[in-house]
Image: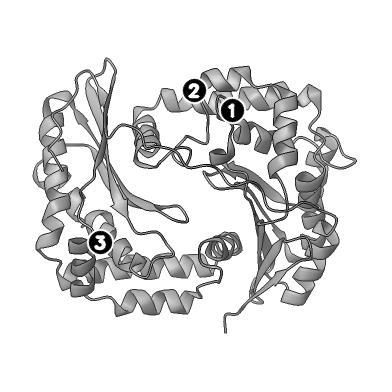
Amino acid sequence: MQSVDATILDNGLTVVVESMPEVQSAAFTLLIPAGSASDPPGQSGLAAVLSDWMCRGAGSRDNRAFSAELDRLGVQLSQSVTAEHLVLNGACLADKLEPALALIADMAICPRLAEEEFAASVVAAIHERTSLEDEPRQKVMLELVRRCYASPWGQPPEGELDDLEGLEADAVRRHFQRFVRPGGAILGVAGRVAPRQAVRFAEAAFGRWTGGASPAPVTGCRGEAVAHLTAESTQTHMGVAFPAVPYRHSEYFAAWAAVSVLSGGTSSRLFTEIREKRGLCYSVYATLGTLRHEAAVLCYAGTSNDRAQQTLEVLIDELLRLRQGITDEELSRSKALAKSALVMQQESTSARAGAIARDWYHLGRVLLLDDVQQRIEALTPDDVLTYVRNHPPVDRTVVTIGPAPLAVPPS
């Protein structure tokens, strides 16, 4: 029987635990409300640099000693930045969870942030950002997100090259002091550990962490709805976005099913109609992206320049055609894909640690896998169709990269 326990420590850190006694490992995800939306104006990418710098030594250990201790414990550690969070993920054998959490706590509470390591963290962030500039498929989606969400929620976690090159170590340290706090942070733990034991480990590791909730970012304006970035190329890349409902919304699973009908596997509409039947593009997909209070459907297509205009038109036509009906067969295929994903998630401690932490952030509770499966199974074509008709693909954002702009059909 799956069960999840949640405890809020005295310092405000929420610890969410799912015991998985059938496995030998344990994993954890720490969500700190210090994502890229918190980057100050003119300092985009600061959170990305900070997340890397925090991994380069913590507590009494310098970079080399900290890495050696992670290896000694067999901890697989990664860090990332989203719009909302600085994220630390780790996995290890269950009997190493206690010392592993102590190491991660040092990163969150007392990273060394040594001057001699700062330049390497900046260079790492610049390399990451530069790689996006060299990959138009990723760049067009980055620019799409930047414009479909209001500032600062759409600004890229990777930052801007000019801002990254101008970052100063003291500014990043001040940002750490202001935003990396236990208030509002969430620690998800999943694996071969009892809830009380995991909470005891967390209290011992993180109990000394102090500070209230971080200041909330101030929401500004959205970017331009239609944009073209000129690039000399034989290909055109396009992104189309429109509003959807976030994970916390009662119609979220209907929204998920609609996107799955569009882009869930090689039998989906976008793949079948645009690539297979018409041969218009080499890659096309749609995905549902969600922040806490808003969400968007994000679509991508990449094609040759001579087929770009037709590809954009057919892509938008397919989005609109969804309102005409959804078959039982299409929905059944989407449900089968969801079941497969749920089974794989159930067998992964890392996936579960991340999922329960994110659930708590979005919902203030955790959806058990059985609950998710029941909600998906209960969906009917009429449910999905009702959602689609109530949330049509209007108010669209369109971004293209290629030698010439395209004529964008009106919303």
Does 355 appear above or below 297? below
Question: Residue 249 sits in which quadrant?
Answer: bottom left
Q: Quadrant of the C terminus?
A: top left
Viewer-proximal residue, 170 or 69? 170
Residue bearing mark 1: 125
Q: Which mark is residue 130?
A: 2
Residue bearing mark 3: 258
Q: In whole angstroms, how far apart are the C-alphas of marks 2 and 3?
A: 34 Å
**Residue found at the very far bottom of the displayed protein:** 1
* Local SS, label 1: helix
Question: What amino acid is at disc 3?
Answer: Ala
Q: Residue at x 46, y 70 (%)?
A: 343
Question: What amino acid is at disc 1?
Answer: Ala
Q: Residue at x 35, y 36 (%)?
A: 147
Label 3 crowd bin: few (<14), some (14–19), many (20+), radius 10 Å: many
Question: Nearer the N terminus, badge 2 or badge 1?
Answer: 1
Q: In whole angstroms, how far apart are the C-alphas of marks 2 and 1?
A: 9 Å
Q: Residue at x 15, y 58 (%)?
A: 322
Viewer-proximal residue, 330 or 162? 162
Q: Is residue 203 left or right of residue 294?
A: right
* Local SS, label 3: helix
Q: State the image coordinates of residue 200 (x, y, percent, origin top left).
A: 81, 69
Q: Is residue 61 left or right of residue 77?
A: right
Question: Residue 406 sits in which quadrant?
Answer: top left
Q: State the image coordinates of residue 352 (x, y, percent, origin top left).
A: 57, 65
